[in-house]
Image (cartoon, coloured by chain):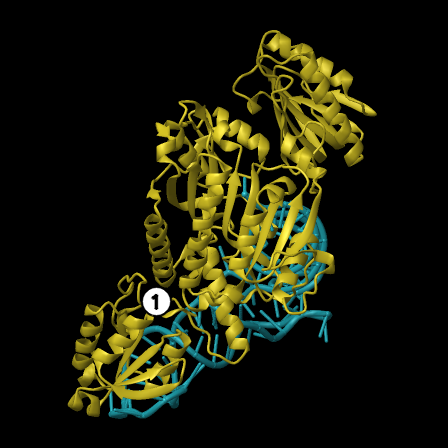
Amino acid sequence: MRILQLHCEQIEYTPISKEISSAKDIQKEAKTLDNVIVAFTAVEAGDDSGIVRRAAADISSSVKKIGCSHVLVYPYAHLSSNLAPPNTAQDLLAQLESSIDADKVSSSPFGWTKSYTISVKGHPLAESLRVFGPEGSGDVANGDAEPDDDAPEALKSESRLESTWYVLGPDGTLTDAEKFDFDNHKQLRRLFKHESSGTRSADEIPQHVSLMKKIGIADYESASDSGNMRFFPNGRLIKSLLERYITDRVCAYGASEVETPIMYDTEHPSMKSYFDRFPARQYTIDSEGRQFFLRFAACFGQFLIAAHAQLSHHNLPYRLYELTRYSFRREQSGELVGLRRLRAFTMPDCHAFCTDVDQAVTELGRRFELSRSVIGDIGLSESDYEMSIRLTRQFYDENTQMVHDMAKKHNRPILVEMWTERFFYFVFKWEFNYVDDTGKASALSTDQIDVENGKRYGIKFVDSEGQYRHPVILHNSPSGAIERVIYALLENAARSSKTGTKPALPLWLSPTQVRIIPLANEFLDRAQQIADELTGANVRADIDDRNESVGKRIRQAEKEWIHYVIVIGKSEAESGNISVRERLTDKTTETDTASLIQTIAQATANMPYIALNAPRLLSARPQIMI
RNA sequence: GCCAAUGUAGCUCAGCCUGGCAGAGCAUUCGCCUUGUAAGCGAAAGGUCGGGGGUUCGGAUCCCCCCAUUGGCUCCA
């Protein structure tokens, strides 16, 4: 049985014509009801009185919570593709109507096509979908309703979730977070407040929102859904470089890259029980009567591949990797901000299938080092992020040494949330969080020890004694979402400009690394030669050949955060040298192309190179930057 | 999703309170200048004042609804 429950200002419906012969004859007149909970109900094959009782109890509890005591039961076949026979449905609907505990319960006619107009109230409990199956199968609640008796196990558990907050020092001391002296760890205090209480104070727009537009990285696309960004050439280039770098590193660590579908059948047994564990907001898509959801991570695709593989303990850890473009999460509209929180985002997602928790713990250590190294090479320093750990007390007691080793490596205090029992699929999880100047914390890198999904997805390996066992699974994103990395880099740039340093992107990510400015048209050929030399040495160089003053073109290069500017005039054309202005030091030096190439090669060593993603001549380039 | 603020030229914003010709700077185009390290000079073009409805002789301006962005709440697998 499926019930779409709507708290309405008003509903007006008019019976039009009989659809089935067993429908009762009635008068075709319009009916209007005000302030009413409308329960659009589809009775499905296999439904019985027990299910009706649970559905009635659920609606009754909504009546109490919402404080509206008029219910309209509205037969609505369109909620299901697996309907009960009409006679059964009519019986059960009548039972439902009489079992709801409310001052007034009415129903609209069964078996008639009806036209209706409806206006639904706007409050958190106004809309919810309930699916009631046979006893024990787990009912599903969706929408904004609070967890109640028919909510999934995970939600019920979460509401009585008991956790304690600590701070773990590099030396292994565990201090009650409330008693910890945060004076020298201001960002960690912000993280603690953000994670534990949820109260924040920010009255300014995060800096990266204007920066992402100003330097031509990304923008909102009003023709799409909120939280789906468009990336301009500069942004696409930066994303490509980050994606390539992270993918190379994950493959070098030992993962095999795969590609999996972005949509999955909601009725697939593994998905169904996963949803029951994590009823989240998804995009859904209909195709020939099947309903699909857009993936919110790469887990499903990789798990289904692993379930298909013939695994033995010799193969483990088995590491799969995918760069998801995209992962989709239909976050509430009020939660979306710039590049920090999106509905469609790019995420490196690497799973490792391990024989047991011990092997998982060892593997986790390797991935911790990988993540630290990746996040550092990308351009974020250790002081830019704070670490947090979530774990069960039992896991802590059994793996104290490993947790303390991580703390020692991190070498700064770590925020710890410890649960008395396990509610989620993981027993342990660490995260690096970027804390921005508005006090918001966002997770970047993360890894988790999953002790549940091996079984759920039927992933098996043969152990040394010939027995089938389910692996323990690690879920790692070494960098976090790519968009979020760009957000962190931009926020960092904005922060440095507040302290008097010029804002900049790391050189290896700069869309233009060298700008060449010919003083007059006659020097354009020489500028082209230099640009050719630089390009040949994997340096992104372009030429501002516009008929503008030198001052203006320098200023333009400054606004684009271009690290090196070369001005070519008469003396350079004659001497063969170049005059290079280095933006961060504000110094102009006379040198030659080869040594500039060497300087740049050293500063971008080991990082990938992708060619300029725009016409070389600025005169040929439309303006996107603001 | 809820509450609040904001939405005017490609961008940043004035005008709105107190209704009466749609404005500025930057960017764009054209012309002049032929440039030496953060804005050379002049002119032109550029508008569904977020969308819809209402009040009014007349609405960017007042009222209602909707959409988007941002902040707070909630949420964040």
What amino acid type is highlighted by mark number 1?
Trp
Q: Is residue A224 visible?
A: no
- Of A293 and A303, nearer the camera is A303
Compared with residue A200, is residue A324 higher up or lower down, i.e. above or below?
above
Residue placed under numbered mark 1 in the picture: A508
Residue A154 horizontal/vertical position (percent): 63, 34
Q: Is residue A284 visible?
A: yes
Q: Is residue B5 left or right of residue A533?
A: right
Any idea which chain is the yellow one in this picture? A
Left or right of A73? Residue A432 is left
Please identify the quarter of the rendering in which residue A24 is found: top right
Q: Is residue A1 above or below residue A64?
A: above
Where residue A86 appears, as percent x and y from the top left, is: 60, 10
Q: Which chain is cyan?
A: B
Q: Quadrant of the C terminus of chain A?
A: bottom left
Q: Chain of mark 1?
A: A
- Which residue is situated farthest in the right direction here? A103
In this view, the residue in front, A331 or A364, is A364
Q: Would residue A575 appear left or right of A483 to someone viewing this image?
A: left
In the structure shown, which secondary structural element does the residue marked by tag 1 occupy?
A: helix
Q: Quadrant of the N terminus of chain A?
A: top right
* Residue sitting at x 39%, y 85%: A586
Quarter occupied by residue A100:
top right
Q: Residue A332, image x and y in percent?
A: 59, 46
Task: From the viewer's side, name the closer residue of A394 and A384.
Answer: A394
